[in-house]
Image (cartoon, helix red, strand yellow):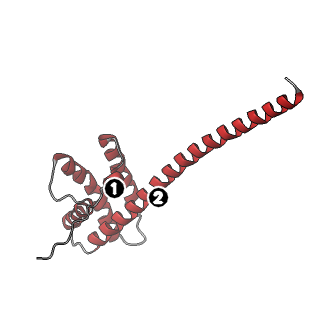
Amino acid sequence: MNPTASFLNDLKTTAETARTTEASFRRQAANQIAVLEQERAFAFRRLNLMQAISDAVASAESEEIAVASALAVLRLRLGWNADSEARTEAITHFGPVALSLFQAARLPEDEPATNIGEALAIFEHWYSESRGSPFWLLFEHQIVDTPLVDF
């Protein structure tokens, strides 16, 4: 191979290597962006749900009312108008989260609070283990536009 052909062959090899490296990086970046996007979405879903539940239990006069109010918010947010065995099981496991919110709101400021985050993490872990997917995926249901008909 003459020097010019050898030089051009080296440039071609370098260019192909650069293309492969770039493509690999783009795939990795896309995967990382997808992971970060899901983490962000879950974090905001967690915040929004827990804020709504916190608001619901704030005015409750008893643990029973607090838990019932929290579970009503959960059902509403998930669009669960009817019960099923799986939904009932999830709601039952979510009860301790609502209870920990209620109890934490009733403690004097100088007393250590119940660990709401731990209760939520236990629920999330249970849901993920028993259902094979994160709880927060339930919030990804698409709302179908219903045409407004005026008679």
Front residue of 34 and 123: 34
Query: Which SS class for mark 2?
Result: helix
Q: Which of the two discs, 2 and 1, labels the residue nearer the N terminus?
A: 2
Mark 2 belongs to which amino acid?
Answer: Arg
Mark 1 belongs to which amino acid?
Answer: Glu
Q: Residue at x 67, y 40 (%)?
A: 19
Q: Residue at x 58, y 48 (%)?
A: 29
Front residue of 116 and 130: 130
Residue 94: give x, y in percent of width and height.
Answer: 27, 54
Residue 62: give x, y in percent of width and height.
Answer: 21, 68
Q: Which mark is residue 26?
A: none
Quarter holding residue 72: bottom left
Above or below: residue 28 compared with residue 77: above
Above or below: residue 49 compared with residue 2: below
Above or below: residue 49 compared with residue 6: below
Q: How crowded is mark 1: few (under 14 residues within 10 Å), some or many (20 or more)?
A: few
Location of the C terminus (image quadrant): bottom left
Answer with left or right where residue 25 lies relative to residue 43.
right
Residue furthest to the left:
151
Front residue of 44 and 122: 44
Q: Do the residues labelled 2 and 1 touch (CB within 8 Å)?
A: no
Q: Which residue position holds label 2? A: 40
Q: Which residue position holds label 1? A: 140
Residue furthest to the top:
1
Q: Residues within 10 Å of mark 2 (few under 14, many from 20)?
A: few
Residue 10: give x, y in percent of width and height.
Answer: 80, 32
Residue furthest to the right:
3
Residue 115: tell me if it is visible.
no
Q: Which residue is drawn at 43% across and 58% down?
A: 41
Front residue of 56 and 147: 147
Q: Distance between the residues labelled 2 and 1?
A: 13 Å
Q: Which residue is drawn at 23% across and 72% down?
A: 60
